Every structure is written in structure tokens, then in C-alpha cells.
Amino acid sequence: MAKQLKLRNHALEIGKRTLIMGILNITPDSFSGDGIYADPKKAVACALRMVKEGASIIDIGGESSRPGSQPVNAKEELDRVVPVVKGLVERNIPISVDTYKPEVAREALELGANMINDITGLTNPKMAGLIADHEAGIVIMHMKGEPKTMQNNPIYEHGVMEEVKIFLTSQISVAEDAGIDPESIVIDPGIGFGKTLNHNLEIIRNLASLKDLSKPVMVGPSRKSFIGKILDLPVDQRLEGTLATIVASAINGADIVRVHDVPESNQALTITDTIFRS
């Protein structure tokens, strides 16, 4: 596996510790209730705080991808995201933009964003070349279906890990064939994106099998509904469940975790990494 993750003018070390991607939702309808809407200054301040608390990358999202969510058009997404990207680029912070729209990705990359987090896994043929042209990083995520309907009885005839691995293998080839640096690619099995409770648990148990793909592995279980189902708790009471999940993920092979609660996650992962990676 690559020893570093290349993100344009940034390079992050992979393997020494579990990296944190801090979630910055610029939306009014985030499932977790943490959306910062129509206040770029507040969003930038939140991002700066997450970096101080231990985040290595800030992931900016201008469209909710929660189950049942309605898509927004590119203009509205750009109106939300662009002021925040501008504010953070000035501070030389590694920035990821959570989008599957090439027009949003292009604008963000031209402004200086370092990475695109694509929940559709480069299935739009315009996306890979665009990222390659800007020498940016990419998170290739697996999703079964689309956010509006993805949790309507998802079925994996050949097993969830096998299907996820086949998809990610294929899309890594798409990325590299388009000219994306092999050391700029991260893979994400897509916890909660067209997966049942048992699918999510199977993925976390078997993260190590994704190491065969020789790319850093990211997981994003933060506050998700499968944690709520196990604990019978609402979204605002899932911190401890999230921490247990990211610790299990780190032990099983995750290199990056995407979370809302950065300081608590940083503490939990510092202990985990000290035990398992030192």
C-alpha cells in the first residue's frame, strides 16, 4: 500500500496512525442535524476547530446523501460550497469536497480543493479525467442504488464484500486509466449506502480483505442508523456507538475514518493506534 496519500500540494502519511476526515455539512437537511447552512464564516470556523482537534482532512458537503434525501441542482450546491472552499484554501488546509457532480467538482478543484469524495464511485464518465487534470485525490465509494431509494431492501446475491470489492477494483482501474495518480486514490466500502445492519457489520469485520486492492481504506460510520438500531438510540445519542465502530474499523484495517465528532474520535484512535500500530 502507498506510504503516502498525495493530494495536490499536500501529502498525508498512511499507516502510521488512523487519519481523521472531519465532516462539514453545508446543508439544511443533514441526517445528523449538524448542517451549517448559509453561514460560510461559521463553517470555516468549524473546520479550523476540527483541524485543531485532530482532523487531517476536511470534507465539505453541499448536498445531503442521507437515505431518502432529495437531490439539489449544481448551482445550489455550488452556492453552498464555494464560499467555504475559498475560506479554507486560504488557510492551506487539505480539503475534500463531497460531490458526484462534475460541474461542482470542477469549480471546487479550480478554487484549490485537494480531493473529491464521490459517493457514486466515478460512475460518471466525466469525473475521473477532471480529477486527473487537477492532480487531485479521489475517494471511490461503493453505493448500491441512489440515496433516495438505497435502503429499500438492498440485496447482494454474491455477498456484500464480494460485490463491493468487485466494484472498487473496477473503479480503481477507471481512475488510473484516466490518469489519476495511484497514490491519490482512497477506497470506501460505503457503510450505510445501500446496506442493511448485517451488511454494515460484515463490512467492518472484513475490512482487511480490501487491503488486497493496495489503496488506503476509508470508512464513514459516524452516527449512522445501524448504530441507532443496535443501541435503540436517536442520532444525537450515538457518539459512544460511533467511537466503538471506528475503533473496530481501525483495528480491522481502516486507514481513514470520516466522522462528525473529531476530538472524541481522535482520543479513541490515539489509544487504538498506540496499542495496535506502535
Image (cartoon, rainbow, N blue to C red):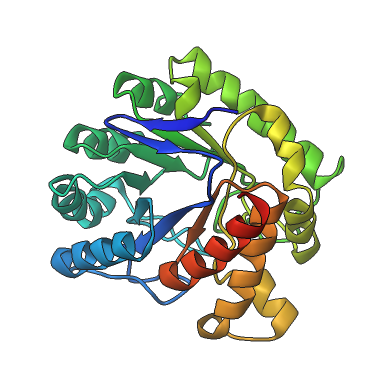
Considering depth in this image, is 220 or 256 the residue closer to the camera?
Answer: 256
Q: Is residue 103 left or right of residue 15?
A: left
Does residue 255 sit above or below 269 in this rendering? above
What residue is shown at x 39% (from left), y 20% (from top)? 129
Q: Quadrant of residue 196?
A: bottom right
Residue lying at the far right in this picture: please name it. Answer: 158
Q: Is there any visible trace of residue 208 in the rendered image?
A: yes
- Residue 225 lies, in percent from the top left, at 63, 72
Considering depth in this image, is 80 or 256 the residue closer to the camera?
Answer: 256
Q: Is there any visible trace of residue 26 in the rendered image?
A: no
Q: Quadrant of residue 24?
A: bottom left
- Residue 144 lies, in percent from the top left, at 66, 47
Does residue 206 sit above or below 67 in this rendering? above
Q: Is residue 230 left or right of residue 14?
A: right
Does residue 190 sit above or below 108 in this rendering? below
- Residue 146 lies, in percent from the top left, at 57, 50
Q: Image quadrant for the N terminus?
A: top right
- Residue 220 lies, in percent from the top left, at 56, 57
What residue is shown at x 39% (from left), y 45% (from top)? 99
Does residue 247 sit above or below 8 in this rendering? below
Residue lying at the far front in this picture: please name it. Answer: 278
Q: Is residue 171 left or right of residue 33?
A: right
What residue is shown at x 60% (from left), y 79% (from top)? 240
What residue is shown at x 33% (from left), y 64% (from top)? 50
Count of all numbered marks drawn on residues in the image: 0
